[in-house]
């Protein structure tokens, strides 16, 4: 992944936005060759929760559906704002109960280091809280810190709870490409990385703006790359996922600019995770 990001940084220094998007290679097709994308937010910190009213208002203004990966403890402590997510018509994904490793909620082991029984309890406890606090049963899951923290042993756990999909990988676990796919357990995996050539590359605020090795520190560069990604998405008739931390957009004052770029346009479809899961099942039958 570092080689991918090094190439993106090099293209950015040259002012070559097309070069940046070319680094991600061909996009997977979905929904009958109609260009489409999914937008999701990970609500991991109290700063993220404080940003949610602004996020929800802006999403409504631009008519964009989104998914929110939410933590059980935060749902239990702050149920009202999580109810607002659902009232606005968005999806909530189970993001575990304590989000191991979490600087405030759980400073112990990484999720991948837990036993299968401990992982199952993290998932089940968040699921119970969603039912008790929100009268809601999630149909999707995102592994804390996803990527290497995710494992296929979780799919039977999810299936037992009645889940339909996971969005926890940065490469397709089936080995057939980088797009969404049906796993042998019947759970649809929808990778956060959707580049066929560089499946480890994510379009997210952490790698682009916030990490120690961020691709671009300037929000103007970030929004320019985002706009070019939409151009490439429409041109290739492919599928992309965009994954943002709520507070990363609000504290920089770029939320409405980002959503304006992602707003509905002719020939571009916004597609929820649940709809993707249905499409993949239809395609696999």
Image (tube, rainbow, N blue to C red):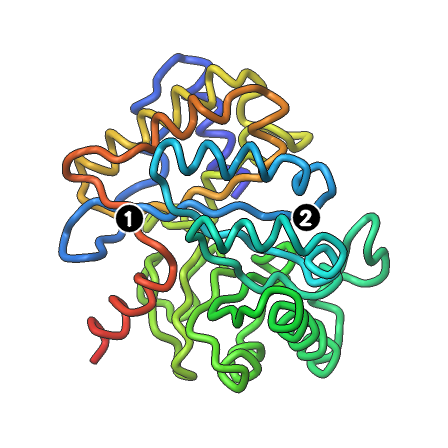
Residue, x 57% and y 79% (percent of image)?
A: 153
Question: Label 1 belongs to which residue?
Answer: 239
Locate residue 177, reporting x and y percent.
32, 60
Secondary structure of residue under mark 2: loop
Secondary structure found at label 1: strand
Q: Which residue is mark 2?
A: 44
The answer to which of marks 1 and 2 sits earlier in the sequence is 2
| Looking at the image, residue 276 lies above or below residue 2 | below
Residue at the image position 55 percent from the left and 61 percent from the top = 142
Marks 1/2: CA–CA distance = 26 Å
Identify which residue, 215 or 14, lies in the foreground: 215
Judge by depth and name the residue closer to the eye, 55 or 134: 134
Q: Say which residue appears at 21% left-offset and 44% top-offset.
A: 35
Mark 1–mark 2 contact, CB under 8 Å?
no
Please identify, in this view, whether the residue under mark 1 or under mark 2 is nearer the observer: 2
**Which residue is located at x 67 percent, y 56 percent?**
79
**How many C-alpha atoms fall within 10 Å of the one at disc 2: few (<14), some, or many (≥20)?**
many
């Amino acid at each position: 992944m570092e080689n991918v990001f090094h190439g993106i940084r090099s293209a950015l220094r040259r002012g070559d936005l097309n070069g940046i998007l070319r680094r991600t290679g061909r996009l997977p097709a979905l929904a009958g060759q109609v260009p489409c994308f999914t937008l999701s937010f990970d609500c991991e910190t109290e700063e993220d929760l404080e940003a949610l009213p602004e996020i929800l208002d802006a999403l409504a203004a631009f008519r964009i559906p989104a998914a929110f990966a939410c933590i059980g403890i935060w749902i239990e402590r702050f149920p009202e704002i999580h109810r607002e997510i659902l009232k606005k018509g968005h999806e909530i994904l189970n993001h575990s109960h304590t989000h191991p490793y979490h600087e405030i909620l759980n400073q112990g082991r990484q999720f991948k280091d837990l036993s299968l029984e401990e992982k199952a309890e993290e998932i089940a406890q968040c699921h119970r809280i969603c039912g008790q606090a929100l009268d809601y049963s999630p149909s999707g899951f995102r592994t804390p810190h996803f990527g290497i923290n995710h494992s296929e042993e979780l799919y039977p756990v999810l299936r037992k709870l009645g889940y339909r999909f996971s969005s926890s990988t940065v490469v397709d676990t089936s080995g057939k490409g980088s797009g969404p796919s049906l796993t042998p357990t019947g759970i649809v995996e929808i990778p956060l990385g959707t580049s066929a050539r560089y499946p480890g590359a994510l379009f997210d605020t952490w790698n682009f703006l916030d990490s120690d090795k961020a691709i671009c520190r300037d929000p103007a560069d970030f929004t320019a790359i985002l706009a070019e990604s939409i151009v490439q998405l429409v041109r290739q008739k492919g599928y992309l996922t965009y994954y943002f931390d709520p507070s990363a957009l609000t504290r920089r004052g770029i939320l409405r600019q980002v959503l304006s770029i992602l707003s509905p346009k002719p020939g571009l479809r916004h597609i929820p995770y649940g709809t993707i899961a249905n499409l993949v099942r239809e395609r696999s039958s």
